[in-house]
Amino acid sequence: MCGITGFYLFKNSYDHGFLIKQIKKMNELLIHRGPDAKGIWSDYKDKIYLGHRRLSIIDLSSKANQPMRSYNGRYVIIFNGEIYNFLELKNLLKDVVKFKDNSDTRVLLELINYFGFSKALKHINGMFSFALWDVKEKTLYLAIDRFGKKPLYWTDQNQDILFSSELKSIVSFYTFKKRINYKALSFFFKYSYIKAPQTIYESTYKVEPGTFLKIDKKKKITKHIYWSTPSNEVDSKLLKIPQDEIETKLSDLVDDSVRSRMVSDVPLGVMLSGGIDSSLIAAIAQKFSKKKIDTFSISFPQKGFDESKFAKRVAKELSTTHNTFSIDDYYLEDLVGRISYHYDEPFADSSQIPSMIIAKELKKKVTVALTGDGGDEIFGGYSRYVWGGKISKFCNFFPLNFRKTLSKLILNLPSNKLNLLNKLFPIDFFPSQFGDRLKKIGKIIICENNFDIYQKLVIQSDKNFLKNKTFYEIENFDFPVNLEISEAMQRMDITNYLPGDILVKIDRSSMAYGLELRSPLLDYRLLEFSNKFLVKNNKIRNNKGKYLLRKILSKYIPKDLINRPKMGFAIPLATFLRTNLEKWMLDVLSKKKIEKQGILDGELVSQTIEKHLSLNSNNHYEIWNLLMFQTWFDRWMK
C-alpha cells in the first residue's frame, strides 16, 4: 500500500529544477501512506513527473521500490494497492519474463507490457490505483480497481494534468486554484460524502470505480469502463442448481478470497467487531493460519453501541489472540481535530472516529489487517433492505392522507425519550437509537415511490444549510425501477455508498497510520457470484440479511453469536456532542464565524445546534456534517 502523485504538463515553461521541487513537495505530503521508501521519476522533455511513497508489504527489498520501469523500458508505473492473484499471473508469464524481484507491482507492469493495458486490467484481482506512463506513445494512464477501494484524484489546471492518491498533494501544486464545488457540497450535506466523479473543488475529479483515463500527447482525455456492477437478475436456468451446491461454491470462493489476502511479508491481523462479516473472516483466517492470529476490536461504555463483548466471545471460540481498545482512552477533541487533514475533503461518516482509533492501535502490532467490509452491500446485510420492502408494501396499501396523519404523530414523539428504551431493554427488543430510527420512518411513510423510499433511508439531512439556496438539488441516482426494492437498494449502495462512504472511511483512517486494510468480501468474484446465483431468499430470510453467510459461519461459532441483532460500527455521537465535544462544536460552528464566512446559513446552523443541546431533537448527523465541512474549510481554504 502506498501513495502516488505526479503531473503531465503541456504548456508549462518552468525549468527542471523547479518542477523537481514541486514533485518532491507533493510526494512528501503522502508520507503517512508510504513511510518506508520514496522515489521520483521524470522526463523533462515530455514534462512527465511521477512520485511514489512506499508502504512495504510484498518483497521488502529495495528492488521493489517505485517508480518502476518495465524490463524493456517502455513503461513506468507508480502503483498503490495489492494484486492478490499476482503469483498466478507471474506463473502465466514465466516463459516470457525473467523476474528479478518478487513484487506484485513488477508482475502488473510486465502483464501490461505483454497483454496491453486494457486486457491486463481484466486479468488482475486486487485493490489498486496506479499511473502508467507509456514512454513510446507519450501517453498517461490513470486506473482504479473495480470497487474503488484505492483513491485517485485528478485535475486539469490551465493545461497541467495533476493526479494523486490524496487531494492535499494536488492542492500543493503552484497552479492549483482552490474553488469550492457547491454542487458537490450540496450533495455532501445530504449524504455525508461526495459522490464520484465530483470532489469538493471545481474542475477536480475522482477516477471512478472500474474505469481508467487515457491522456495522450495531444491532451485528449478519454474515459474507459473496463468493469461495471453486474446485473442483479438471476438466470432462471441457474435456479435449478441444488442449494447445497450453491452454498459450497460460495464457501469455497470466500475461502479463496481470504487465503489470497493473507499473503504478506509483514505481520497481519483481523479487525473483529463480533458481527457476521468480520467473524467469518476471522474464522477462515484462523483456519488457514499456522499460528494464532491477532484480532482487534473497540469498546464503548454506552449500552446499545458496544459490541466488544461479542467480539471477545467470537475470539474465544476461534482461539485467536484478542485485543480490545476503549474509546474512553482517547481524547476525542484531539482526534476530531486531525480528521480534516486525513480526510482532505468534507466527509462525515462518524464511524471514522473508531476507525481511526483502531487503525492507530493495530499499527502498533501489525501492518496488514483483514476487515469484513462489503458483506452488507453484496449479501443484503443492512436493515434498510428489510425495512425498505416493508415500507414499500405499507405505502402501496394505505392511502396518502392516512400516511400523512400517521407521519405527523410519529414526528411529534420525543426521540430522546424513545432512545432511553435502549437502556431499559435489550437490543433484541429495541434497536440502537430507536427513537431516531422511528422518526426516520415517520418521514419515509409519506413517500410515493421506491426511489423516494431509498433516498429517505440514506439521506442524512433534508435541510439546505447553504446560504445560497439555489445550490440545493436532489441527486438523480439512476435508480433501477425494474428491480425489487431491496435488490435495487443493494445496487445503489454498491455503486454509490460503498465507494463514496465506506471505502473512503477505511482507506483514510488506515492510511493515516500506514496500515493496509484488505476486504475479502469485496472480491469482485463474490459480487458476480452473488448476482448470478443468489436470489433474494438466499440473502434476506426471516427479516435477516446475509442468510448464506450465516450458514457458512455456523460451522465455526455457536448460532447464538450469529443470530443476534445487527449493531453496526456507530458511536454515541448525539451524547458526545452534548458532553465531550460540546465546547469544540460551539467554537467551530459559532454563529459570528459562520455568518462572516458567508457560505452557510448561520441562523439555521444555530437553530439546529440549539434544538440538539436542549434535547428537543437529535440533530447529531446534521451537526456532524456541518462540523466536518467547517473543520475542512478552516484547514484547507484559509
Image (cartoon, helix red, strand yellow):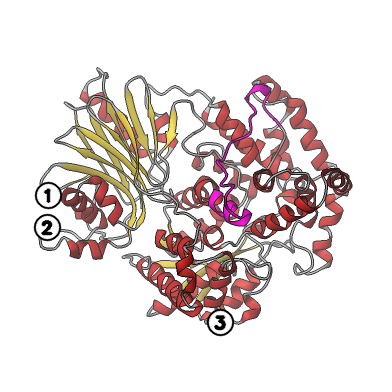
Viewer-side label of 2, 3: 2
From the image, tell me which residue sits under label 1. 71
Query: In 3D space, how far apart are the residues under numbered discs 2 and 3 (Cα atoms)?
Result: 46 Å
Other residues around mark 2 within 10 Å, as few (<14) / some (14–19) / many (≥20): some
* Residue 470 magenta-highlighted: yes
Task: Judge left or right: residue 337 versus residue 59.
Answer: right
* Quadrant position of residue 168: top left
Q: Earlier in the sequence, mark 2 or mark 1?
A: 1
Check if mark 3's residue and mark 1's residue have beta carbons within 8 Å. Answer: no
Give the percent coordinates (x, y) of residue 69. 17, 45
Q: Please indicate, yes or no, whether residue 364 appears anywhere in the rendered image.
A: no
Which residues are the magenta region? 464-492
Residue type at mark 1 is Tyr
**Where does residue 136 sit, x and y in percent of width and height?**
14, 35
Q: Which residue is mark 3?
A: 317
The secondary structure that most of the magenta stretch takes on is loop
Task: Please state which amino acid type lies under the numbered disc 2.
Answer: Val
Count residues near mark 1 (Cα–Cα under 10 Å), then give few for <14, some for 14-19, many for 20+: some
Q: Is residue 490 magenta?
A: yes
Q: Is residue 516 left or right of residue 562?
A: left
The three-letter code of the residue at mark 3 reads Glu
In this view, the residue in front, 4 or 583, is 4
Q: CA distance from mark 3 to mark 1?
A: 49 Å
**Which residue: 43% across, 48% down?**
148
Q: Position of residue 542 (x, y in %)?
A: 68, 71
Identify the mark nearer the N-term, 3 or 1. Answer: 1
Are discs 2 and 1 less than 8 Å apart at CB? yes
Q: Nearer the viewer, residue 562 or 55?
A: 562
Which residue position holds label 2? 97
Residue at (57%, 26%) from the top-left corner?
182
Q: Is 549 above or below relative to 164?
A: below
